[in-house]
Structures are given as structure tokens and as C-alpha cells.
Image (cartoon, rainbow, N blue to C red):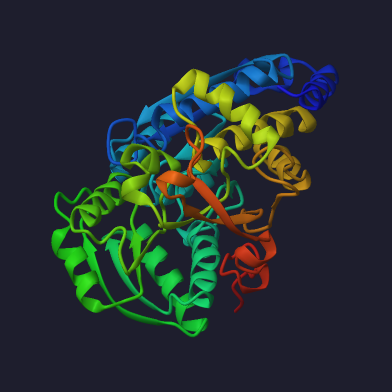
């Protein structure tokens, strides 16, 4: 942990009014994750470890009260995610949820948290509607969203010759949002969309979907899915000799874990958008190596965001002098995020945390010089260009309905 961070934490804790300002005598934070399904490697034990690292780095206590982390597996079920959230808020005295894996699960948990006046921070889910139509006064969309991914990838790739696109899309809300947002950017940038093929979550065979993409003749194949679906689609594309090939494959929700598992020979040349890369700065490298020592893998953006947002939440509790929702939310919005994950990040009125986004190309095997050296930086997109302008927001907190 850096000396600067230690000093900031010590200063916050030294002015703490004591555990009496904390409800139930403990600050309890939870994560509702996929611990065993298609998104387990992208969230799972890594996100749990990241949150616990933040608590340990903070000192294990805030306002004199112990900090506790609880974790549950929703088994990719919205019903289970909802049941966990209701139990945690109603019976287990959980003060805030630091992540919910999956956009469909996140949407329902966010809604429940809003009715219970509880804080929920979202790192893994990307659906744009979380900070748009479905926004709440107690939620923060922290790591990325489909709009930012689309604008980081779509505009730059079209400008560099990838003018015709075909999408292979997972058949649920996140996939729809990812495809729709990217398609809109492609068209607005002068490109064309030649079609899409939709597959179920957890599809067993991607051959037919990929052959449709190949037969379309599109310059770019956009994989609008995530987790194991993206991994299996890329694996099959390599088997079909489509990677490497004349079409550029874009992993709209691809993470470093998948590149590692598949290998550079399989993923070389793919394009992806990220809000964090472990090798992007000295601070990122230092934290990531600590994470690696604990988890055995380098962190992805979702896991790094979980650490950052957990630390930001705990700092807000210390600044507010209480774990009550309203003053903590105000403190979170008032303070910029400056750490290894984001620089001058801000939480807007719609709950969106705005920060820079990055476009990467996956390296060829002979371009990689050390373990986990997988990404070649292509472009940095400033936060105010990557994320949707606040004036265009559909969040009712920003533009209340009239009449």
C-alpha cells in the first residue's frame, strides 16, 4: 500500500467519532457474484479477494467499527439474486453491496436497494440502462457500461477501416444493449451493420453463429457476449481458422483472463476496450502483483474496480462520520477517484462513474516479452468522450418527468 494511501486512511480514521456512529456496530458490505457459472472467472473469487484487500488496506475498521465482507453466489438467477439482496438488507444488516455479477441480476438488486435506501455499487454488469432508465439515488455504476465500450471500440475501428460489422450476441439484456450501442456508433461513424446472430447464455456450440458472421463478409465480427460465451466463441473461431484471418474479431466484453486461458496464438489481433490494464502504470503494476500473489492471476478491470470502489465507499463512510446512506452517497459523489484504477474519476448525478477508457489490441505471440504481457495500447478515450453526456441521460434523477 502506498504511503499516500496510508496517510489518507490514517487521517480519516483519526477523526472518526467511534463505533456509535455505525448502525449495528459493524460496517457490512456484500458481493453477489457468479462463483461457479459462466462469469465465475471474471468476478468470483477474484472480486471477493479484491474487496477483502481493500478492507485490509483500509485497516479493517472504520469509525472504530469492524468491516465485514459477505459473499453469495446467485447461480446466474435473477430470483436468487433478488432473494439474497432482500435477506441481506432485511435480516443480515448489510449496509452496501459492492458488486452484482450480470446485468439482469444487477437491475433487480439495484431496484431492491433503491426501495430499501441501501447503497449498491456495480462493477461487473455493463448494461447502460443501470444508470439510465433504471438509475436510483443509491446506486453507482463504476467500471464501465455498454455506451463507453461501444464508443471506445466502434468509432476508432471504423475510422481505421473496419466499416462493416456483424454481431454474435448473447440473448439477454446485456447482449442487446452491447450490440445496440455499438451498432449505433458504427452507423454514426459511417459504417454499416450487416446482421447479427443471437445465441443463448451458456451456448454449447458457436459454429453456426460464426459461420453466419463469416458468410456475411463483414470486416469486423463483434462478440456481444461475455464470460465463458466469449471464450468459447473465440476458441471455435480459431478452430474454424477465422482467427487470425481477414475479419477482425472484437471482444466487446473480453477480459485479460480469457486471453490468458486461450493464449495469444488463439486471440492475436483481437480488439477490446478496457477501463484498466494491470501493466498500464507503476501503481497498477504494484497493486496487481499483490493481487496475483493472492489469486494466482492478474486482475481484470472488474476486479480492480471492485477494490477501488470498496476503498472509495469506506473513505466516504469515514468522511461522513456515519454509515447512513444519504451522507455516505453525498461523500462518494463529492470526492474524485484518484488511484491506480482511475484518475479524476467522478460520480455523476445519474450514478455513473466517469473515467478514461482504453482501446487495446491483443499482441501476437512474438510481441509478448513476459508473463501476462498481452495488450498493446491503441488509444485512450477521455471519460467525457467515452461515456454518454449527462445532458442526454434518461435517468429520472437528472431529468425528472414533467406533467
Q: Residue at x 54, y 41 (%)?
A: 120
Q: Nearer the viewer, residue 261 or 346?
A: 261
Residue that lies at the very extreme toward the bottom in this rendered image: 190
Q: Nearer the viewer, residue 89 or 190?
A: 190
Residue that lies at the very extreme toward the front in this rendered image: 366
Q: Nearer the viewer, residue 245 or 150?
A: 245
Q: Is residue 177 visible?
A: yes
Q: Residue at x 76, y 45 (%)?
A: 336
Q: Residue at x 41, y 57 (%)?
A: 269
> In the image, is 359 to the left or to the right of 342?
left
Residue 328, picture quadrant: top right
Position of 121 relative to 4 (above/below) = below
**Residue 16 point in image, percent of width and height:** 81, 20
**Residue 56 point in image, percent of width and height:** 62, 17
> In the image, is 83 to the left or to the right of 18?
left
**Residue 66 point in image, percent of width and height:** 63, 14
Position of 17 relative to 139 (above/below) = above
Q: Is residue 93 visible?
A: no
Q: Quadrant of the C terminus?
A: bottom right
Amino acid at each position: 500500500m502506498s504511503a499516500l494511501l496510508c496517510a489518507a486512511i490514517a487521517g480519516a480514521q483519526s477523526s472518526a467519532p467511534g463505533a456509535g456512529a455505525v448502525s449495528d456496530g459493524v460496517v457490512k458490505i456484500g458481493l453477489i457474484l457468479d462463483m461457479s457459472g459462466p462469469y465465475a472467472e471474471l468476478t468470483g473469487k477474484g472480486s471477493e479477494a479484491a474487496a477483502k484487500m481493500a478492507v485490509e488496506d483500509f485497516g479493517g475498521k472504520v469509525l472504530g467499527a469492524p468491516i465485514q465482507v459477505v459473499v453469495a453466489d446467485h447461480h446466474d438467477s435473477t430470483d436468487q439474486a433478488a432473494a439474497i439482496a432482500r435477506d441481506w438488507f432485511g435480516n443480515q444488516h448489510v449496509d452496501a453491496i459492492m458488486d452484482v455479477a450480470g446485468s439482469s441480476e444487477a437491475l433487480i438488486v439495484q431496484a431492491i436497494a433503491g426501495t430499501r435506501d441501501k447503497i449498491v455499487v456495480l462493477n461487473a454488469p455493463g448494461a447502460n440502462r443501470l444508470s439510465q432508465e433504471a438509475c436510483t439515488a443509491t446506486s453507482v455504476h463504476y467500471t464501465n457500461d455498454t455506451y463507453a465500450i461501444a464508443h471506445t471500440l466502434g468509432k476508432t475501428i471504423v475510422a481505421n477501416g473496419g466499416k462493416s460489422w456483424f454481431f454474435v450476441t448473447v440473448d439477454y439484456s446485456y447482449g442487446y444493449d452491447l450490440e445496440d450501442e455499438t451498432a449505433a456508433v458504427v452507423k454514426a461513424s459511417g459504417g454499416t451493420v450487416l446482421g447479427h446472430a443471437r445465441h443463448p447464455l451458456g451456448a454449447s456450440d458457436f459454429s453456426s453463429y460464426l459461420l453466419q458472421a463469416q458468410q456475411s463478409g463483414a470486416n469486423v465480427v463483434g462478440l456481444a457476449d461475455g464470460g465463458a460465451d466469449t471464450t468459447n466463441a473465440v476458441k471455435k473461431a480459431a478452430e474454424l481458422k477465422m482467427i487470425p484471418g481477414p475479419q477482425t474479431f472484437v471482444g466487446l466484453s473480453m477480459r485479460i483472463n480469457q486471453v490468458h486461458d486461450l493464449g495469444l496464438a488463439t486471440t492475436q489481433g483481437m480488439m477490446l476496450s478496457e477501463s484498466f490494464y494491470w501493466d498500464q502504470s507503476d501503481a497498477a503494476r504494484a497493486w496487481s502483483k499483490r493481487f496475483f500473489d493472492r489469486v494466482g492471476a492478474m486482475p481484470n478491470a472488474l476486479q480492480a474496480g471492485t477494490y477501488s470502489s470498496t476503498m472509495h465507499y469506506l473513505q466516504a463512510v469515514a468522511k461522513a462520520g456515519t454509515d447512513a446512506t444519504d451522507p455516505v452517497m453525498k461523500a462518494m459523489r463529492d470526492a474524485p477517484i484518484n488511484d491506480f484504477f482511475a484518475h479524476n474519476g467522478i460520480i455523476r448525478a445519474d450514478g455513473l462513474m466517469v473515467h478514461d477508457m482504453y482501446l487495446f489490441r491483443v499482441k501476437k505471440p512474438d510481441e509478448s516479452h513476459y508473463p501476462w504481457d498481452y495488450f498493446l495500447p491503441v488509444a485512450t478515450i477521455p471519460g467525457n468522450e467515452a461515456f454518454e453526456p449527462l445532458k442526454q441521460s434518461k435517468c429520472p434523477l437528472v431529468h425528472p418527468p414533467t406533467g
